[in-house]
Image (tube, coloured by chain):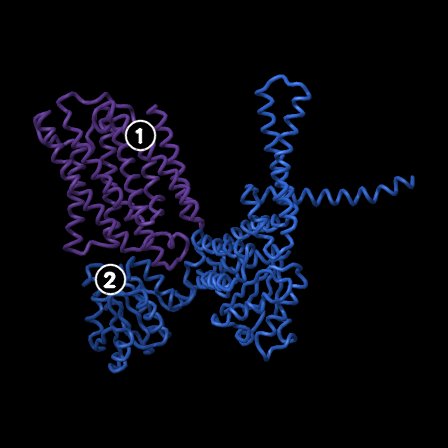
Chain colours: A purple, B blue
Amino acid sequence: MPELLSYLTMGLYFGGTLLFLLYLWHRSEIISKISLVATSLGFFSHTAALIMAMVSTGHVPIMTFKDAMSFFAWGLVLVFLVVGLKRGLEVLGAFILPLAFLSLVSATLAPQAADSLAPVFQTVWVHVTLSILGTIGFAVAFVAGLMYVMQERLLKSKQFNVLSFKLPPLDFLDSLNQRSILFGFPLLTLGILTGAVSAQLTIGSYLSWNSEQIWALITWFFYFAVLLGRVTAGWRAKKAAYLTIVGFAGVILTFVGILIKSPQPLSPL
Amino acid sequence: MNIIVLGLNHRTASVELRELLAIQDSRMGEALGRLMAYPGIKEAMYLGTCNRVEVYAVVEKGEWGFRQLEDFLVSTHFSLSSEDLLPHLYRYSDDEAIAHLFRVSASLDSMVVGEPQVLGQVKEAYELALTHRSSGVILNKVVKKAISVGKSVRTNTRIGEYAVSVSYAAVELAKKVFSNLKQRVVLLVGAGEMGKLAAQHLVNQGVKEVLITNRNHHRAFTLAERFHGHAVPYEQLRSTLPKVDIVICATGAPHYVISKDDIERAVHHRMNRPMFLIDITVPRNIDPTVKDVDNAYLFDIDDLKAHVGQNQEERLKEAETAEHMVREEVGSMVAWVRGLEATPTIVALRKKAEEIKQGELEKVFNRLGELSPKERAAIEGLASAIVNKLLHGPVVTLKTEAQSQNGFAFIEAARRFFELREREIHSEEIQLLKDEAGDVISEETLPQKDGV
């Protein structure tokens, strides 16, 4: 049953991705409605699978790389459904859905890790959940940055096409970017702190300087600088957009770092 | 019975002629009364907009109806003669009339395709027809559908979402940078006509504040009053720039009033908050190299015109989608109207009753098992008797009332009571036509056989 649900979810997200990408270039508004339905159905089956896993294991299913990626994708789609529906911004789907779909695909391609953690590690799931939620914030900031850069280029080159029509205004994208980081950064901070504490409890040291931890710290300092720069040095608008695109590359590298370390149970970031 | 429309629009007649035919709302009652007084006109609606004057009517005979509508239009104004009017009129009937109304209400027939006013005007025309009781079953259904088609075209295509005037294009582009213009400060430099127009559009969007500066400070004051804004001394132009989000430049000066350096400094002061600049004059007043400044978005008159040009193309492309939607809706509407004839309705009614009867008989026979032919005949007879007696009343009423003034209401009621769908009736009608054709052939062939 969970297997079936996960394939169903993936299929629906894939359909949603294709339709949303088509919607970017196509005039018809109906496409976005259909893809919205596909995405919502995918989200329901995804949620059902998560709940079933939660019932059987007793915690949020995030202890393997696969589960973590799946949870990440779920959070992304949730953000899209909330922001997209509230603001009538179906176009967000063309950027978030591919990301969610790719996360799910990479989750299935990744080697299946060992079973859940030993009892000592049980508190670790707090750290993982927080880190993933933080990453979702950065992913949305990345998407907002990407859309900003696209819209900015279209405006500068004075191309007024279907795409420029559908992309939201620059200031909205900039504030979405900022709010996403403001959402993600505290969560990442807490994620890193709880990670350090559980590391201290389990292996007796807060930091073991592996590639994953180094990248997590670099990412943390980076986003800290981005937030600080906005207030002090005017790192907003175009600059903020580019910075968050680059920053998300750091996040992806962290994930790759974790993937290389697998198949041990993981703690992303 | 035919639905017809007679009218003239911006393509067929001058505005002077259209004006002569305009009827004020206050005199609509009298005009519609005059229309309905023509024998053979069963329902009527008058649609007058700035681009068109049209009379829609449900008549007994199309040809005759057109002549009556012509007569009506000619008599709306004393100075008109039918020679003046006739060459400018277009006539559509049945499917074409319905399609025309749908296209009008979807703004596909407008001078500016996609303009939003016409839908409201169709609604008003319909409400007037309702108030003066000149619309009936058919126009009610057709016009309501036209309005809903118009709405659906507006919501499902982007036909109305592209600005097609240069001054409004400025607003549209500003909205690509700023999602909410209500928090924005606008600076109008100079007093050129286009600049004022663009500023007016922005004011209509409810911008937070309008600042006006001009070499002639007195003029700036006058304009400030008009826009409920503030005049800024011309010498303070540069120091004001960091405070404003949107700059409209229309001075008529033969040189650049705002340099790249000015904007670079302003954006820096604004901590990279974007600026939107419109240079609406020729020769230009804002240094074109401003476009290279990060977070400053400069558009000159050519850019705006190009934008409008593309918008018009976009609207036409959207219009294709809309035409498609209209065509689909016309099909089902035509089927409904055709179903309003009495004969196909009666045939459909009988067929439905027969189907129900057969279905029920089958069930009963299955349940009862072995029956003697006599018992079967008795049960069948009972069912037929009930069906026939029940249907007798409605069928007779339909036949007699179909000829009366509100015959369509009876037919429509019958269709609702017995849940007869348009398509069924329509297919009945086609079948009927085929049968009639068959009868003709057999009648023609019979004597020949005798001859052989």
Q: Nearer the viewer, mark 1 or mark 2?
A: 1
User: Mark 1–mark 2 contact, CB under 8 Å?
Assistant: no
Residue A19 in which image quadrant: top left
Name the residue: 57% across, 68% down. B8
Chain letter behind tag 2: B
> Across the whole image, how many numbered discs are drawn on residues?
2
* Secondary structure of the residue carrying numbered label 2: helix
Left or right, B144 with respect to A227, comes to: right
* Secondary structure of the residue carrying numbered label 1: helix
> Label 2 amino acid?
Gln
Left or right, A136 with respect to A123, comes to: right
Q: Position of residue B95 (x, y in %)?
A: 61, 54
Q: Mark 2 — residue? A: B183
How many neighbours does mark 1 have within 10 angstroms: few (below 14), some (14-19), or many (20 or more)?
some
Q: Position of residue B309 (x, y in %)?
A: 45, 63
In the displayed structure, A148 sits above or below A263; it is below
Q: Nearer the viewer, residue A84 or A96?
A: A84
Q: Mark 1 — residue? A: A48
Left or right, A59 with respect to B114, comes to: left
Most extreme residue toward the right is: B452
Left or right, A56 with respect to B153, comes to: left
Marks 1 and 2, how far apart at CA: 43 Å
Quarter of the figure that contains the C terminus of chain A? top left
In the displayed structure, A6 sits above or below B276; it is above
Q: Position of residue A101 (x, y in %)?
A: 34, 36
Name the residue: 24% across, 62% down. B183
Quarter of the figure that contains the N terminus of chain A? top left
Q: Position of residue A83 (x, y in %)?
A: 29, 46
